[in-house]
Amino acid sequence: MQEETPNIDRIFHALGDPTRRAMVEKLSEGPLSVSRLAAPFGITLAAVVQHVQVLEGCGLVHTEKLGRVRTCRLEPACLERVAQWIADRRSLWERRLDRLAEELAEADEEAGETPEPEWLG
Amino acid sequence: MQEETPNIDRIFHALGDPTRRAMVEKLSEGPLSVSRLAAPFGITLAAVVQHVQVLEGCGLVHTEKLGRVRTCRLEPACLERVAQWIADRRSLWERRLDRLAEELAEADEEAGETPEPEWLG
């Protein structure tokens, strides 16, 4: 039942925090330096760095240091894994609803009010 | 930036645990009593109840007690919210890639190696 590599736990955990989701939101418009990413949040740079480390730890964000600037960019493949997990659940769910609908239709037929008349040619 | 109601935090948190994800997986095939839901996990019923409470607290699962049996069913609308959140990020991301592609094409034109010859009719 659990064939996923372990980091989907960490992806969900990372996305459970509103500041980290807001960071993912900003990065989905393009890469940013840590300080530009931090600007709108009104929290200490240390707190921002911690959030970035969580995002990097689960693979949602990749960071790279060029000179004195560390740039963050989103790894969309990681969000796709979560989307795929949900899509798989949805398809199970929909198959179940289809089966239910079939069963109801069959039950309807069996309970059938008046049987179809036989036409003699 | 954060217009979501607060329980998306709790949905992501709930899905960050592999046992709870496995429970959601089982429930996506149809409703189950707590004891049947618990069966494959080899953990105490108390631990299962705690997980179910987390799933119920964020809205992913609805439970109902009939006589002595508590039945759990998935609330797919809750998974849809997570799917929508990801889809919104993806669309920002794709728009950004489109813009990048346009900019590259324009830069190509401006740097244009040899200009298109003019055909005189």
Image (tube, coloured by chain):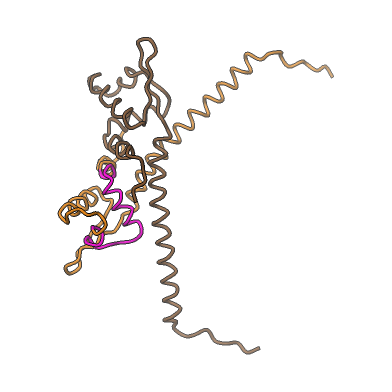
Chain colours: A orange, B brown
Q: Position of residue A93 (x, y in %)?
A: 45, 31
User: Looking at the figure, which quarter contains the C terminus of chain B?
Assistant: bottom right
> Could you say which is closer to the camera, residue A69 or residue B112?
A69
Q: Which residues are magenta?
A: A14-38
Q: Is residue A24 magenta?
A: yes
Placement of B106 over or under B56, stated as above or below: below
The one nearer the camera, B85 or A78, is: B85
Q: Is residue B39 above or below residue B3?
A: above
Residue A22 percent across, percent down from the top left? 30, 51
> Relative to residue A50, is residue B120 drawn left or right?
right
Residue B3 spot, x, y in % from top left:
36, 46
Q: Residue at the spot x=55%, y=21% of the render? A: A103
- Quadrant hosting residue B76: top left
Q: Position of residue B12 (x, y in %)?
A: 31, 39
Residue at position x 25%, y 41% from top?
A13
Residue at the extreme bottom of the image, as rendered: B120
Q: Quadrant of residue A30?
A: bottom left
